[in-house]
């Protein structure tokens, strides 16, 4: 493999990202510009931006690697990633926009009026953002190492520097432009090589790859059907319900002009994601035909980058690898930028400004930029301690965390009047402790084997329902803590803006 074309395309993607950020700087002057792009992003543009930041390292590289290793079991990942936005569309897209909040912490405090709950949300947004940033940096390191043999930390540092500059330059307005462009870069980068490689495979007369059935894996072992079914259902539950709790996804709905536009945005997002996820399984199937076993030291996450030179050696293979490398780095940069933006937002409001003695409306862009440095720098330092889990597995654990914490808060906060701050704190605390404990034991490699390891590596099936149950039970036991304005808040969340504007003011 000649790494030069790939390195050139990576450098071009990074430079174009920085150039677009600099262009967006002229539009960003106010706090509203930096946080929510003045709430003026149209649905088509916003949908592309959501697709750009949502299609992460796990989507571009990890899904193909998982299907290559585990077979049909892991087809639930692209299904769940897309279906998550159906849940967002049905339950929370428009109400979140009507809440008028900037962050998840703002929504929690506005709905339940609890500073303690706001602090818990802030901590969870930071932890979730950093946990999700790690696989993006790890994926960049894997890509650089597969292409050049350089140490894994190099790719992570490059992504960190570009993302920091990107967010510092123009905030949400700048990111919207960059991420919308990145979606189409990623779609082109994964679709065109897939079509070419399938054509080469058909021309060469290779046999049809065999994809294992439920419970089988690439190493020749099998898993009991009960364990395979549990894994599939737990994964699907976590991905479907975890999407609405991802801070970098939720903040995007605050940028729409109104609730109706938020729903339109979500419909377009579902179509864009469905189109993209047609292609990763193709790489997994081709890997079965051309790469029966992985080379020593290589990860399945690098399968997408290894295939072109195996199937079409020479200039064609190097060109296709360069295209895929550009798409992979667009995935790393856009997702990491969205996460950095979301984490910086809560750090700015709830950590940096209080530490500097600034009031909520003071500090402006300067405090936001201080928060950005912390939001991107700390995950880069933590990168060295991350174990070599697959990208999709790591991201799946983050979805289980958000499904067990923010999902109960959002669903019950939007649809249930009797929710109390005590119940929300109890449910989120239980979900956070359970999901984080499962994540730590899995990432550290001490989860064991058999059902114990499976329950900890796929915790969504038990952490999510228990979190809902704790929230509901504790809320029912504390009826005196229901906010007095709960009904008025719910009416505002569910009333279209056009009707609100026609309502006469109270005397």
Image (cartoon, rainbow, N blue to C red):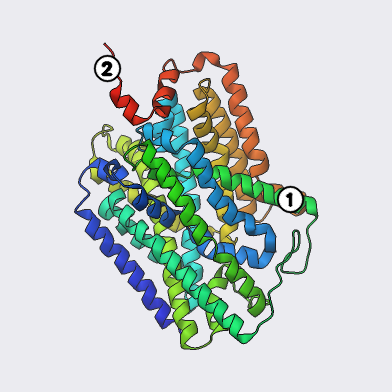
Q: Give the class, few, some or many, for how many residues have Cα within 10 Å of label 1's Cα (few <14, many ≥20).
A: some
Along the horizontal axis of the image, is 345 left or right of 440?
left
Residue at the disc numbered 1: 229
Instruction: Tell me: residue 61, above or below residue 233.
Output: below
Determine the image quadrant of residue 465: top right
Instruction: Tell me: residue 145, above or below residue 125.
Output: below
Instruction: State the residue at coordinates (57%, 77%).
Output: 198
Image coordinates for residue 322, horizontal then vertical, percent: 43, 77
Instruction: State the residue at coordinates (34%, 67%).
Output: 14
* CA separation in Å, label 2 and label 1: 55 Å
Rendered-image quadrant of the C terminus: top left
Image coordinates for residue 450, horizontal then vertical, percent: 77, 53
- Dot 2 or dot 1: first in sequence order is 1
Along the horizontal axis of the image, is 209 left or right of 330?
right
Looking at the image, which is closer to me, 454 or 403?
403
Total tally of numbered discs in the picture = 2
- Residue at the outermost top position: 507
Kindly state the secondary structure of the residue where label 2 is placed: loop
Instruction: State the residue at coordinates (39%, 41%).
Output: 262
Along the horizontal axis of the image, is 184 left or right of 219?
left
Along the horizontal axis of the image, is 474 left or right of 106?
right
- Residue at the outermost right position: 224
Q: Specify the label residue 40 is tagged with.
A: none
Determine the image quadrant of residue 433: top right
Looking at the image, which is closer to me, 483 or 260?
260
Q: Residue 410: tell me if it is visible.
A: yes
Image coordinates for residue 408, horizontal then vertical, percent: 55, 33
Residue at the disc numbered 2: 505
Instruction: State the residue at coordinates (49%, 51%).
Output: 270
């Amino acid at each position: 493999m000649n790494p030069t074309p790939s390195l050139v395309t990576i450098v071009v993607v990074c430079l174009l990202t920085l150039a677009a950020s600099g262009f967006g700087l002229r539009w960003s002057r106010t706090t509203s510009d930096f946080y929510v792009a003045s709430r003026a992003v149209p649905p088509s543009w916003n949908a592309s931006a959501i697709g750009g930041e949502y299609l992460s390292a796990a989507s571009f590289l990890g899904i193909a690697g998982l299907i290559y290793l585990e077979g049909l079991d892991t087809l639930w990942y692209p299904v769940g990633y897309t279906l998550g936005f159906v849940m967002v569309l049905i339950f929370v897209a428009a109400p979140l926009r009507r809440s008028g909040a900037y962050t998840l912490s703002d929504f929690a405090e506005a709905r339940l009026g609890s500073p303690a709950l706001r602090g818990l949300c802030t901590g969870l947004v930071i932890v979730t953002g950093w946990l999700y940033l790690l696989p993006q940096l790890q994926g960049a390191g894997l890509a650089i190492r597969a292409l050049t043999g350089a140490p894994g930390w190099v790719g992570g540092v490059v992504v960190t520097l570009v993302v920091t500059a990107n967010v510092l330059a123009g905030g949400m307005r700048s990111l919207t432009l960059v991420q919308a462009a990145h979606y189409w870069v990623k779609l082109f980068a994964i679709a065109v090589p897939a079509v070419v490689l399938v054509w080469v495979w058909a021309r060469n007369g290779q046999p049809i790859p065999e994809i294992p059935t439920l419970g089988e894996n690439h190493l020749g072992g099998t898993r009991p059907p009960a364990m395979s079914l549990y894994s599939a259902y737990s994964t699907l539950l976590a991905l479907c319900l975890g999407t609405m709790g991802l801070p970098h996804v939720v903040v995007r709905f605050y940028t729409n002009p109104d609730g109706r536009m938020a729903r339109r945005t979500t419909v377009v997002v579902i179509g864009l994601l469905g189109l993209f996820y047609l292609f990763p399984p193709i790489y997994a199937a081709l890997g079965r035909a051309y790469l029966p076993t992985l080379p020593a030291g290589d990860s399945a996450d690098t399968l997408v980058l290894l295939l072109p030179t195996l199937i079409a050696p020479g200039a064609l293979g190097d060109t296709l690898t360069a295209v895929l490398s550009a798409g992979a780095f667009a995935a790393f940069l856009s997702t990491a930028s969205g996460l950095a933006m979301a984490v910086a937002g809560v750090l700015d409001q709830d950590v940096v400004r209080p530490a500097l003695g600034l009031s909520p409306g003071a500090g402006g862009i300067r405090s936001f930029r201080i928060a950005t440095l912390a939001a991107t720098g700390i995950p880069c330092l933590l990168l060295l301690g991350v174990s070599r889990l697959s990208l999709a597995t790591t991201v799946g654990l983050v979805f289980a965390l958000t499904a067990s914490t923010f999902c109960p808060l959002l669903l019950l906060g939007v649809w249930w009047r009797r929710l109390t701050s005590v119940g929300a704190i109890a449910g989120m605390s239980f979900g956070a402790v359970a999901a984080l404990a499962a994540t730590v034991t899995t990432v550290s490699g001490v989860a064991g084997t058999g059902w114990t390891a499976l329950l900890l590596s796929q915790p969504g099936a038990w952490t999510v329902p228990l979190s809902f149950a704790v929230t509901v039970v504790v809320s029912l036991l504390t009826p005196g803590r229901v906010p007095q304005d709960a009904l008025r808040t719910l009416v505002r969340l569910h009333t279209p803006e056009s009707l609100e504007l026609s309502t006469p003011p109270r005397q």
